[in-house]
Image (spheres, rainbow, N blue to C red):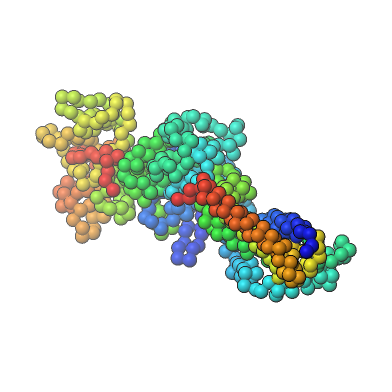
Amino acid sequence: MSVMDWNPLWLTMQLAGVTVVVLLLVGTPLAWWLAFTKSRFRTPVEAIVALPIVLPPTVLGFYLLVALGPHGPIGGPWKDLTGSALSFTFTGLVIASTFYSLPFVVQPLHGAFEAVGKKPLEVAWTLGASKLDAFFTVASPMAIRGYLSAIVLGFAHTLGEFGVVLMVGGNIPGMTKVLSIAIYDHVEVLEYTQAHVLSAVLLVFSFLILTIVYTVNRRLPIHVS
Amino acid sequence: MNTLAAQFDVRYPAFHFQVSLAVPLEGVTAIFGPSGCGKTTFLRCLAGLERSSRGVVRFGNTVWQDEAQGLFLPISQRPIGYVFQDPRLFPHLSIRSNLEYGFKRTASGQRRLSFDHVLDVLGLHTHLDRRPHELSGGEQQRVAIGRALLTSPTLLLMDEPLSSLDGKRKREILPFIQRLDTELKIPIIYVSHSLQEVLQLATTLVMLKDGHVMAEGPLANVVTHMDWRGLVEDSHIGAIIDTVVEAHDLEFRLTRLRFGTRHLSVPHQEKGVGEHLRVQILSRDVSIVTSSPTFQSSVLNVLEAMVTGIGDVDSDHPLVDITLDIGCPLLATITRKSLAMLNLHPGQSVYVQIKAVALCQDIPE
């Protein structure tokens, strides 16, 4: 029996953390646009954002692998720029996870912004706030529950992904070998003790974080009537 | 005197909003009309919340909007306060932070109203550390008014600020709005579908219908104009007169009101001498006599008047409107038979007997 290797756990946390940050930066303007646009592209964009929910992870993983590879539309230019392709790297994993977890961040934010609506923003504007000012001081705090859900769901969903990371990241220890793949590997070679420990860690962690979020959420001082 | 000149032309699927107006920048200008006439659209266009492709807004000598010149001042840069139909307080902020939101965003050099002064006028000192949902609807609306005032606006736009409140709350807030005009000297544009509120508050009146201006001008002139009859219920047709309490007659329990050089006697009012009182004289309560009233009459208020206009005598309706001048416009409704008997004509000197005087704060809905 080999020694317990905690590297995959650390790598997974890093991946989920970075992905959530990227998702908030990308997802917030996208969710805002979806909540307030009257454009006829709204529905197709909404459908595209929701695709990762219904697609098998291997399909998404396959396309991402092609796109991020040395000859792909994203990986190609990236290779010209940096000298290496994106597939089988940590950066590639972040990009893949961003696509994979996009709906889990955009949808709660979209709903929260819609619930806030235009009315409080109009008030803020008439009180002298610029659009950006009104977004940060009125819309964002009023949508705080949406943000909380988005962060937790985005983080948790990235934590649990398997198919996409396997396709795009391969299984390189210390670089792309995340927790879910490590557990699979342990089971493959009948190392049940290690699989048990890692699975239990993930289970308890997920349970704790969800409990904390639901508790905090209930106590948030937001009363929209 | 400064005026606010505005022109808008907005086409909606079932509605063409086309308005060109110039209103004085003092007192309360009421925008009055039935639901769906474009009152709120007018306010939203003025504020810049709605954009009209051919819009023009001139505030005194400052141009806020002139689409032909490609000029459009964004809402946040227009010196207006906007009070919406619902209070729309920020639920994540305390009452104090709500009030401070616009105050903080107003350059200190631009602040003409102090924080404490506004809180005094609106009676807001007690709830500062509470959250909006802990306040009643009336209190919330007062906070919303205070929040708008604290940006020291040069124009206050109010969109039916009392419509979500019951009668008791309305009577609680109306005096505050009157004090904004008299104490803070901020011109107000007040949108309402309630004639009662309008008659109580307005100095200038604009009537909208189906997106068009039907009547506009000083309140006393508009409500005594013949065309006004077609626009509101008959039971509301009459003159509005602003008076000052001059004396109380304790023996007969009467109060003497003065307007210009004329007087009216009304049942005793709990008002101090010198206080203002706005009254309504319904046209059906005015009768006309041509000779000097040497006879005795039970009617207390008999005034000299001059006939200024006679309504449509060719209709087959038994009644006809007569406009008169008693130092201010007055409207009388008499029968066509009386008109023929008295042989009235414009320019003629007559006497009017006023049978009843109503106080504007008591006018029923």
> Nearest the camera: B121 or B87?
B87
Which residue reaches farthest right?
A83
Q: Position of residue A19 (x, y in %)?
A: 71, 58
> Nearest the camera: B217 or A46?
A46
Q: Is residue A50 above or below residue B21?
A: below
Q: Quadrant of residue B350?
A: top left
Q: Position of residue B92 (x, y in %)?
A: 52, 45
Q: Is residue A205 above or below residue A219?
A: below
Q: Quadrant of residue B174?
A: top left
At 40% from the left and 38% from the top, the residue drawn is B177
Q: Is residue B157 above or below residue B242?
A: below
> Nearest the camera: B305 or B246?
B246
Q: In the rendered view, does A14 fall on the left or right side of B277?
A: right
Which residue reaches farthest left?
B296
At 34% from the left and 42% from the top, the residue drawn is B169
Q: Position of residue B359 (x, y in %)?
A: 27, 38
Residue B177 seen in the figure: yes
